[in-house]
Image (cartoon, grey):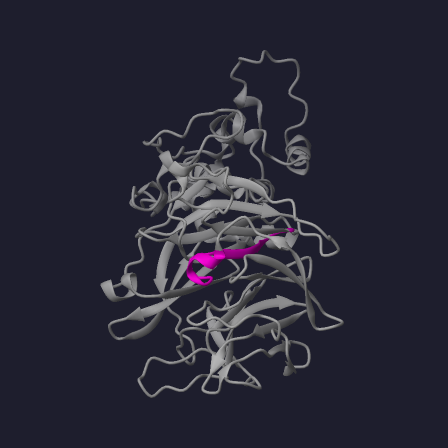
Amino acid sequence: MSKEKRRATEEENEGLDEYCYCLTEKDAFDLNCCWPDDSGSSSPPKKARQPCESNDELMLNLGPDSSNQVSELSQNMISSNIGTLGEEPQDADYSYNIPSLSYEVESEILARFPRSEYWKLCFVNRRFLALVKSGELFKIRRDTGFKESSVFMLASGETSWWAFDSEFKSRMKLPIVPSDVCFHSGDKESLCAGTHLLVSGREIDGIVIWRYELAKNQWFKGPSMISPRCLFASATCGTSAFVAGGIGTSAKSEVYNTAEKYNSESGSWDPLPRMKRRRKLCAGCYMDNKFYVIGGRNEDGELTCGECFDVAKNNWELIPDMLKDDPVLTCHSPPLVAVVNNQLYSLEASSNQLKVYMKKTNTWKQLGQVPVRADFNRGWGVAFKSLGNELLVIGASSRSSYSSCSSNFMAIYTCCPDPDATDQQPWKLLDSGRNRLSHFIHNCSIMVA
């Protein structure tokens, strides 16, 4: 390594010696909970080694498993920098022949690693530790369109949130939210924006928001909404999130028709125009570059209409009778909706029926039953989300082949929905009790980063 680069590395390492990355804390990241992959490799060791001092050890420290996960583009970038190594023995230590990569090339390569492997980078050297923590890798991923979906959920009986990869082959236990007993025991609502997970709930002093930042693996309080609320609709679009409707905490609080937009880049809320109707217990989604708010109720009773906020025009448009055919249940959950490939799908809680919204006719078409029991608790406790090009549903399985010993644990299914299909959708079982989490889901949000 050149003297100049070694000096720069030493400068970056200053101040990091006393910093203990929170992924190594037991309460924050349980390495033993990382499931083995299809190759049968075992879980990572509970005690991780200390970060290395030099970037020259990159290819040696990441190991063969991680190296195989580098994309073809990343491999080409490596080849263009290190040249031909010659006919060296496979078991020889010839790392001294490999020149250091530029920081820019290193960052481009590391950004293409699977996000579930980022914890390994924290133990390579202190520069990689700082790089992961800075969030720079996620900015590169966003700019290059290299993104992955993660599922964040809080199941009944759990004190910590869990984060799963899109195939539910690995999971990470998040740090416990440093809030009070009122927040932990009460109802909460969640949404994602960029690499932020926002959880809204009530503390002793009122409604608050706790923000989890993926890069730092840490919770932060705030920022609060302009009008703190609960029972609201929400939707995500890239680094932004939308909320609308809901109700305040005071005894005389009326149902809201206000809306707000959260920007994860600035960490702030901006007001939006008011909706056409006041509504709470409503559902939200993002489709056709519009924020949709569907159903809910207000002082006049149940609402079958929906409305959408056109981002370009900065106004709301009312959609009458959007849920006119849905049966009305007492004490039911907000509508269970998800958008896949710009198509809106709904899970009818009373019948476990999957339906697709026909935009041109303002009607719904049935696509068969889902393999979970949404009717158990009138839609409460079921997660129904979009996961890339698939629908994701989590809850108590309705299939007779589901093991009786696993009936108390969550079943996880996905499918690539076909809006033109006339028969049952091909649901795929991803998990049938292996994770040992309750089938009643308090909160679930999808992060794409």
The image quadrant of residue 11 is: top left
How far across and how far down the image is residue 84, in percent?
Answer: 68, 23
How far across and how far down the image is residue 187, in percent?
Answer: 35, 66
Count of numbered badges drawn on the protein: 0
Q: Which residues are magenta?
A: 374-389
Q: Is residue 184 above or below residue 147?
A: below
Q: Is residue 355 above or below residue 84?
A: below
Query: Looking at the image, which residue is at 35% across and 33% down?
Result: 50
How far across and how far down the image is residue 219, in percent?
Answer: 36, 58
Q: Foreground residue, 403 or 19?
A: 403
Q: Foreground residue, 154 or 126?
A: 154
Does residue 80 appear to the left or right of 104 in the view shown?
right
Q: Is residue 433 above or below residue 388?
A: above
Asked whether residue 242 appears in the rendered view, the answer is no
Does residue 155 appear to the left or right of 131 in the view shown?
left
Q: Foreground residue, 115 or 339?
A: 339
Query: Looking at the image, which residue is at 25% across and 66% down?
Result: 182
Query: Looking at the image, which residue is at 51% across and 69% down?
Result: 234
Q: Is residue 260 magenta?
A: no
Asked whether residue 155 appears in the rendered view, the answer is yes
Query: Looking at the image, which residue is at 66% across and 36% down?
Result: 77
Q: Is residue 387 magenta?
A: yes
